[in-house]
Image (cartoon, rainbow, N blue to C red):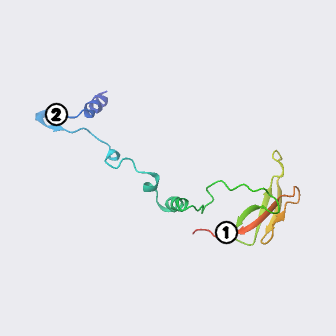
Amino acid sequence: MAGRLLLRACTTTTLQLRSNVVARPLHRAMSTAKGIPTDEEQATGLERRALQALKRGKDPYSILKPKQYAGTKEDPHIVPCTGTKRLVGCLCEEDNTAIIWFWLHEGDAQRCPSCGSHYKLVHNELPH
């Protein structure tokens, strides 16, 4: 109760203390001229690198939703990889519970053995 009254008293312009000393109101450090720092100003390390890359239009850690592809031979689904082959899982139908797994190798687009969707492996360098 006494703490609340003290805080209410501190929100006014001045506070009269004993022996005629005038105290200024308490202010938070963040309410200075600059205001609350943004995410970019507070970020450090890996988070800072990711924010800077997103600002430049790159997505180094696959944070953003991938672009949708038709899955045809002319417009295959793009699969990023750091090697020459990668294991890919295809949900052939939207409500299917079984995943069709197959190896995707570097080179031309390859088809899913079950539904026929095309996938292409693209070499992707990691940012670190």
Looking at the picture, tell me which residue is in the foreground, 73 or 63: 73
Q: Amino acid at mark 1?
A: Asn
Q: Amino acid at mark 2?
A: Leu
Residue 92 horizontal side relative to residue 53, left or right: right
Where does the N terminus fall, quadrant-wise? top left
Numbered tag placed on residue 17 in the rendering: 2
Q: Position of residue 66 (x, y in %)?
A: 68, 56
* Residue at disc 1, secondary structure: loop
**Residue 116 found in image quarter:** bottom right
Q: Position of residue 77 (x, y in %)?
A: 76, 60
Numbered tag placed on residue 124 in the rendering: 1
Where does the C terminus fall, quadrant-wise? bottom right
The reply to whether callout 2 and callout 1 are in contact (CB within 8 Å) is no
Numbered tag placed on residue 62 in the rendering: none
Identify the residue shown where x is 77% and y is 65%.
120
Identify the residue shown where x is 82% and y is 59%.
72
Q: Residues within 10 Å of mark 1 (few under 14, many from 20)?
A: few
Looking at the picture, tell me which residue is in the foreground, 66 or 27: 66
Height in image: 13 above or below 97? Answer: above
